[in-house]
Image (spheres, helix red, strand yellow):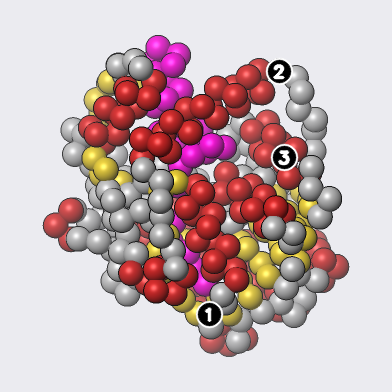
Amino acid sequence: MRVIVTGAAGFIGSHVAEALLERGDAVLGIDEVNEYYDPRQKEANFALLRKHSKFSFLKLDIRDAPTLTAAFIEFKPEKVIHLAARAGVRPSIEQPRLYYEVNVLGTLNVLEAMRAAHVNDLVAASSSSVYGSRNPTAGAFKEDDRVDTPISPYAASKKAMEELCHAYHELHDLNITLLRFFTVYGPRGRPDMALYKFLDAVHHDEPITVYGDGSTARDYTYIADITAGVLAAVDKPFPYEVINLGNDHPVRMDEVLKTIERVAKKAPRIVREPPHPADVPYTCADLAKAKRLLNYAPKTKLADGIAALNEWLFTAERLLDSSQHKAL
Ligand SMILES: NC(=O)c1ccc[n+]([C@@H]2O[C@H](COP(=O)([O-])OP(=O)(O)OC[C@H]3O[C@@H](n4cnc5c(N)ncnc54)[C@H](O)[C@@H]3O)[C@@H](O)[C@H]2O)c1
C-alpha cells in the first residue's frame, strides 16, 4: 500500500511511518521540520525511517498548497495519514493565527490535494482537548458528547479541522476517520510535554514546575498503543467517524510524580504554580467505540511507559550531544 504521512518527522508521525514501513507499505513522509522543538530530534527520527527502502521524504510546509497537491498527484497514495500540526496547547495562546493557518488551512490543503489526486481515505489527528474543561465527575469522554466549549486556540483549531473534514466527507465522498488522541507519551516524545520535561529535569537536578495542587489528571496513552490504533484505522476505512484513542485510565499529577521518582530513583524538586488557564483539569477517554470499530485495546501501564521514555531519553541525549546528525 502507498501511504502519505504528514508530520512524519514528528513524534507520532515517525512511529506511524515506521510501523507502516516495517509491514511493507511504501511511505512518503511530508514535514516542514520546524523548530517548535529541537529539529535534531526530528532529523534523528528521519534517519530511522530512511533505513527503509520504501521511505521517501519531502520537506514541505503544508500551507504551500500547490506543491502539496503536486506531491500527492505524483506519489499517487492510496491512503493519507494527516498528523502535521502545531500541537502545543499553551503556545497556541501566543500564536493563535499560526495554529489556525497550519491546523485548519493546512488540513484544507490536505483535503484539496486528496481530491486532486483522487485519494479517498484519510485518517487525521484530532485531540482530547476538543472536549474542553471537565472535572472527574463528568466521567469518561464520549465521541458524541458536545464539544463546543474549547479553552485554547489549539483545541478550537482541532475542532475546526474536524468540522472541515465532515464537510469534505459530505460534499466529496471522502472516507475520513478522525482520531482524538489523549496525551500521548513515550520514546521520541515531544520535549514540551510533561512526562518528558519532568524526567529531564529530575536527571539534571532542575526543579519541576507543577501547575495546580496535583489533583489534575490525564489519560496518558503510550505511543505503541496509539500507533496500533492508527494502523487499525488506516486498514478499516469508514465513511466518517470520530474515534477516541486513549487509555481509559486517568492518572493524577501527584501519582505521576511518584512514578517519576520511582523510575528516575530520585525525588523531584517541585515548584508549584497556579493552574494554567489553557490546561484542562481532567481527561478520560471512553474507548467503547474504539474497541468496537477498531478492536483497539491499549496495553501499556504508565510505569512501564515512563521507564521506556526514560531509557530512550538518555540515548536520545547522547545522540543530540554528538554531531552524528546529517542535515535533511
Ligand atoms: N502528542 C500528543 O499527546 C497529541 C495529543 C492529541 C493530538 N495530537 C496530534 O497528533 C499530531 C502529531 O502530534 P505530535 O505529538 O507527534 O507532534 P510533533 O510536533 O512531534 O509532530 C508534528 C509534526 O508536524 C510538523 N509540522 C508542523 N507544522 C507543519 C507544517 N506547516 N507543514 C509540514 N509539517 C508541519 C512538525 O515539524 C512535526 O514534525 C498532531 O496533529 C497533534 O495535534 C498529539
Residue beneath label 1, please? Answer: 238
* Magenta range: 177-206
Give the residue drawn at x 27%, y 43%: 251
Give the residue drawn at x 47%, y 64%: 179
Query: What amino acid type should be assigned to the residue bearing mark 3?
Result: Leu
Give the residue drawn at x 18%, y 33%: 213
Kindly tell me whether residue 207 is visible in this rendering. no
Badge 2 or badge 1: first in the primary sequence: 1
Give the residue drawn at x 76%, y 66%: 2
Q: Is residue 121 left or right of residue 213?
A: right
Q: What mark, if any, has residue 167 been given in the picture? A: none
Q: What mark, if any, has residue 322 been given in the picture? A: 2
Badge 1 or badge 3: first in the primary sequence: 3
Query: What amino acid type should be assigned to the residue bearing mark 2?
Result: Ser
Number of numbered markers: 3
Badge 3 or badge 2: first in the primary sequence: 3
Q: Quadrant of the C terminus?
A: top right
Q: Residue 284 at what x, y percent from top left?
A: 29, 55
Q: Residues within 10 Å of mark 1 (few under 14, many from 20)?
A: some
Q: Quadrant of the N terminus?
A: bottom right
